[in-house]
Image: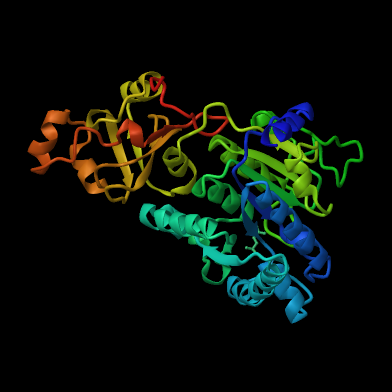
Amino acid sequence: MGSTRTETMAEAGRSLPTIRRAVVKVGSQVLTTADFQLERDVFEALADDVVELRRRGIEVAIVTSGAVAAGIGRLGLTEKPKTIPEKQAVAAVGQLNVLWLYKEVFGTRGLAVGQVLLTRDDLENRRRYQNAKSTLQTLFRMGIVPVINENDTVMVEEIKFGDNDNLSALVTNLVEADCLVILSDIEGLYDRDPKSDPGARLLPRVDAVDETVEAFVGASKSHAGTGGMGTKLLAAKRATHGGAAVVIASGKVPHNLLRVFDGEEVGTFFPPTDDPLTRRKHWIAYTVKTLGRLVIDRGAVQAILGRGKSLLPSGIRRVDGDFDRGDAVSLTDPAGTEIARGLVNYSAEETRRIAGLATWEIADRLGYDWGDEVVHRDDLVVLLSSNGFASKTPTDG
Ligand code: GLU
């Protein structure tokens, strides 16, 4: 059965890899009407599709939006809240309604849902990341459908994911899903803005999210949610770099989700990159916030970019910021261009003291050492200027 389905996908030009676990992101505009009421039919159709996917052996986590939008509708507000406390209050109301409806539509189909609310802090910290991961794994194991949203009620600017498109890409990496489906209110990615240009063409397939593709997207904004096509494209880039296939499709057309898995040509398909980042490097590249900057000399730039080496203290010219051992920093060349990101073995203060020294001098200067490398190559991800992060340091193979 599995192989028949794979053939169908290939015939349709959609060589989706074998999917065992998928993340489905559903936008506010899909879940609510223009006057901010929840669309029960959409929830029902979504639940039907998820039940069918699970019957086919595919586990599904839902990343849902709609808390703010549903709160607006429930409270009878005439416009979107402007201040953060207002948004938080409105989301607190709406999140209940959204989850209640998921609970109902899945409940009548014999499935339990579990609510998971995340902040960026939860995923930035490696220990909390592992914690969130094992909770989600357990939900899957118990046959529960995780329904994830940003924890809007405690969000402040510094700990925000920004939008649920980004959240869904990070969750795809977190739960090691092999597919992310972003259900939006438009059909997929167009070569021009379809709202203002009737000649715009839907792109059925995008092999790499590069500058040409990014140029297709104007500053499109969502009516009910936070993102636009730009944030969806960024999410597609991040998820494909982690080894997942991505489809952006309309969630307004009932059962489009199932069509995606039937290999039909709906929306825009982004195949996973051939050479994905490991989960850990993906986390370093896209989830963790950098807390400092190491300006390194030309020799060190060459060693890292050309030969996949670790960063030693001798190559460090300047240390900016305040970070601890284990934190993420950005590595820049002498002109200030970011070339890589990595996790440091030394705090900012220690790094300042050993910058420029030979490795054998570290212990003399500090009275101890944490190893020769300030950033070990295993903890370092090289940045490619136009297209995100390289999957490997150059000598990995
Ligand atoms: N977390 C927000 C909500 O549920 C949505 C954010 C977004 O639309 O990207 O209302």
Residue sitting at the far bottom: 75
- Assign the C terminus to one quadrant of the image: top left
Residue 214: where, in percent of width, then height?
A: 68, 36
- The answer to whether residue 196 shows anywhere in this view is yes
Which residue is at the front of the view, 384 or 257? 257
Vertical arrangement, residue 388 with respect to residue 95, above or below: above
Which residue is at the front of the view, 51 or 79? 51
- Assign the N terminus to one quadrant of the image: top right
Residue 211: where, in percent of width, then height?
A: 65, 31
- Please tell me which residue is depicted at 60% across the width and 33% down the height of the picture: 272
Which residue is at the front of the view, 73 or 9? 9
- Please tell me which residue is depicted at 62% across the width and 44% down the height of the picture: 235
Quarter of the rendering containing residue 65? bottom right
Residue 32: where, in percent of width, then height?
A: 78, 65
- The answer to whether residue 205 shows anywhere in this view is no
Vertical arrangement, residue 213 with respect to residue 35, above or below: above
